[in-house]
Image: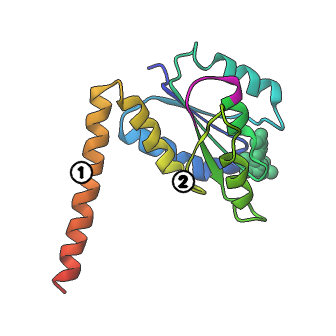
Amino acid sequence: MKPLVGIIMGSDSDLPVMEQAAEILDQFSISYEMTIVSAHRTPDRLYSYAKSAVDRGLKVIIAGAGGAAHLPGMVASLTSLPVIGVPVKSRTLDGVDSLYSIVQMPPGVPVATVAINGAKNAGILAAQILATSDDAIYASVDKYKKDLESMVLEKAQKMENK
Ligand SMILES: Nc1c(C(=O)O)ncn1[C@@H]1O[C@H](COP(=O)(O)O)[C@@H](O)[C@H]1O
């Protein structure tokens, strides 16, 4: 199945965070590809990845990076597909550097930025973007949210009955 979502990250050290996006896409049975692309270390690869994305059938790109996280913004500059940015928690500044690098994009080049290490929400958001034109994906996401609601209501009930 051709991947609909591209998950990219600046380094293999981002994988423990970024694989949470893959896990939730698996739950929704959404096809994806996952690889390393770095604006800083592999600029030519970044260019060819972003430029070929739409022709390869991708609909959404999730880009995660830490520190001076230019990857999501640079991808967004090179393609008109929606880009979701995941600030990965860095070793020195706790990911605040990653967050600020990703979130403050200039007008005209948005990156939908999730929380620090928020790769799971990035996956859900990608599914919701796809769901606007796919009823089966919409139904999966809708069920996920209803299950979440039931789970919390059950916990509330247990807490009240103690
Ligand atoms: N922020 C970027 C970019 C980029 O934005 O192009 N490329 C790698 N990195 C980040 O550097 C951090 C440390 O990388 P290493 O663990 O490989 O030293 C990672 O979090 C990666 O996302």
Q: Position of residue 11 (x, y in %)?
A: 73, 44
Identify the element where label 1 is drawn: helix
Which quadrant holds the C terminus?
A: bottom left
Q: Is residue 68 magenta?
A: no
* In front of the other: 29 or 53: 53
Residue shown at 35% from the left, 31% from the top: 131
At label 1, which amino acid type do we have?
Lys
Q: Position of residue 27 (x, y in %)?
A: 37, 42
Residue shown at 70% from the left, 61% from the top: 96
At label 2, which amino acid type do we have?
Gly
Q: Given the current orientation, which residue lies at the most extreme left position? A: 161
Specify start and end residues of the magenta stretch as a single range. Answer: 77-83
Locate residue 72 relative to residue 62 in the image: left or right.
right
In the depicted structure, whether residue 56 falls above or below residue 59: above
Report which residue position mark 1 lands on.
Answer: 146
Locate residue 93 relative to residue 3 in the image: left or right.
right
Quarter of the image holding residue 28? top left
Report which residue position mark 2 lands on.
Answer: 118
Q: Residues within 10 Å of mark 2 (few under 14, many from 20)?
A: many
Quarter of the image holding residue 141? top left
Q: Position of residue 73 (x, y in %)?
A: 70, 37
User: Can you tell which mark lies on residue 92?
Assistant: none
Distance between mark 1 and mark 2 Cα atoms: 21 Å
Locate residue 127 relative to residue 145 in the image: left or right.
right
In the depicted structure, whether residue 59 falls above or below residue 97: above
Identify the element where label 2 is drawn: loop
Colour treatment of the image: rainbow
Q: Position of residue 67 (x, y in %)?
A: 76, 53
